[in-house]
Amino acid sequence: MHSHAYRESCPFKGQRVLVVGAGPSGLDIALEVSKVALRVSLSHHLKSSQINFKGKSVQQVTDILRLAPGKRVEFVDGTKDEFDAIIYCTGYKNSFPFLHEDCKITTDGFGVEPLYKHMINIEHPTMCLTGLVTFVCPFQLLDLQARFFYSLMSGKFQCADKREMYRELKADQHWRRNKGYGPRQAHKLGALQQEYYDELAKIAHIKSIDVVVSKLGLESTKRIYSDLCSFREAKFKLLDDKNYLEL
């Protein structure tokens, strides 16, 4: 099954479960299922030292080489094991079947294209696709993108001409390819998120997202891996728009 169909751990009670993928959903599901399953293995290609389950019964294994007959799974390091269930936490493919082809939005190239600032349809600038960027503070991001687009539609600023928007898009894609990113990382920000927030705010003459929010977002992402079992219990106090204190 894919993680989008996962609802609760009960169906996996007493089973040997393989979870594939070490993103946030994969880590959460592996941790939750480990409480009822006979055993849980987490297949990923991160360094094992990056993920701390604090003694929970989750075995970390390498990428899958192939699914063998029966319940057997073979891994790239040559090891083999048997499982009763496999949960794929491998992300999603972008798809917009409700959009007519005249919209010119495609998903079979390098991410969702052609978008200016990862949101504005270059061919039809009155069309905006929000929330595509990843490794960000999602709720604050969506608010910022909505305010950006509202300002554009209100005539408070104008987008660059089509040629310049395409030039910027190609430059961004070239940079990402040079970093070794593939189509799945076409809209990834992470450490670059504050720069993106500030750029949108400057263009649209609106308030950006406070730096302290980005800092907390990045800190939370780190703690998912270093302190998975208890990172949600951390408490912070905002000192100003740039700094915070852990309580």
Image (tube, rainbow, N blue to C red):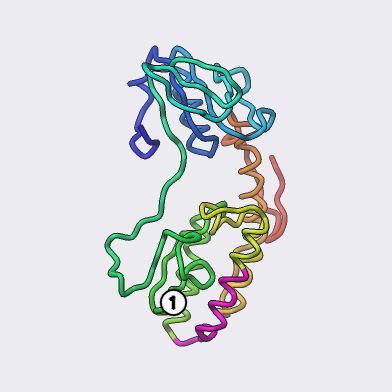
Q: Reply above or below: 216 against 235.
A: below
Quarter of the image holding residue 175? bottom right
Question: Which quadrant of the figure contains the C terminus?
Answer: top right
From which residue to which does the magenta span run?
Answer: 155-171
Measured as percent of width and height from the top left, residue 160 is found at: 54, 84
Q: Reply above or below: 39 against 174.
A: above
What amino acid type is highlighted by mark number 1?
Answer: Tyr
Residue at figure coordinates x 59%, y 30% from the top left: 230
Residue at figure coordinates x 41%, y 60% from the top left: 107
Badge 1: residue crowd in 10 Å (few <14, some 14–19, many ≥20): few
Quarter of the image holding residue 11? top left
Question: Which quadrant of the figure contains the N terminus?
Answer: top left
Relative depth, front residue between 45 and 11: 45
Position of 150 compared to 195: left or right?
left
Measured as percent of width and height from the top left, residue 196 is found at: 61, 66
Pointer 1: what residue?
150
Mark 1, secondary structure of its residue: helix
On whether residue 160 falls in the magenta region, the answer is: yes
Position of 20 compared to 97: left or right?
right
